[in-house]
Amino acid sequence: MTSASPEISRPSAPQHASESHSAGRQQKQTAAYILDMLLEMRLVAQGSGLRHLVHFIELASYEAFEVANGKPPQPADLRPSRRPSGE
């Protein structure tokens, strides 16, 4: 019986500035997408009366907002009304 040894992660080669910028942009886009999902989840949790879950979703929303926008959110930033009507 043979067992596979776990792979050892090695530091990658230094990234060029354009690769680093692209990775940063992708991280911001991913955080914005996650933020949208979290805000929808928060509405569902609130509607179901899941107060503790709402709290944890809000904590995650703050982190996602900060990564996506480069600044901490203000109270109005995470309100459901931040979306244009018709969406």
Image (spheres, rainbow, N blue to C red):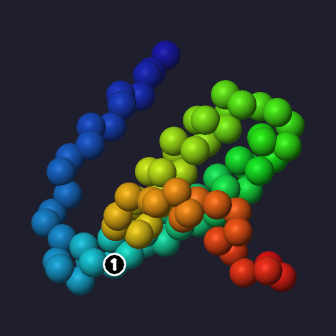
The residue at the point 67 percent across, 28 percent down is 52
Residue 63 shown left or right of residue 79 in the figure: left
Q: Is residue 40 visible?
A: yes
Placement of 37 over or under 53, stated as above or below = below
Q: Quadrant of residue 48?
A: top right
Relative image position of residue 75 (x, y in whole percent): 52, 57
The residue at the point 25 percent across, 73 percent down is 20
Which residue sits furthest top?
1
Relative image position of residue 37 (x, y in whole percent): 67, 58
Q: Secondary structure at mark 1?
A: helix
The residue at the point 44 percent across, 51 percent down is 63
Placement of 83 over or under 5, stated as above or below = below
The residue at the point 35 percent across, 64 percent down is 71
Mark 1: few/some/many CA within 10 Å (<14, 14-19, 20+): few
Q: How many numbered marks are there?
A: 1
- Return the residue nearer the eye: 46 or 64: 46
- Return the residue nearer the eye: 14 or 67: 67
Placement of 53 over or under 10, stated as above or below = above
Residue 67 shown left or right of residue 11 in the figure: right
Q: Is residue 37 visible?
A: no
Quadrant of the frame with the C terminus: bottom right
- Return the residue nearer the eye: 86 or 81: 81
Relative image position of residue 32 (x, y in whole percent): 53, 67
Residue 44 shown left or right of residue 78 in the figure: right
Q: Amino acid at mark 1?
A: Ser
Relative image position of residue 65 (x, y in whole percent): 47, 60
Placement of 26 over or under 66, stated as above or below = below
Which residue sits furthest left?
14
Q: Quadrant of residue 5?
A: top left
Q: Which residue is mark 1?
A: 22
Q: Quadrant of residue 36?
A: bottom right
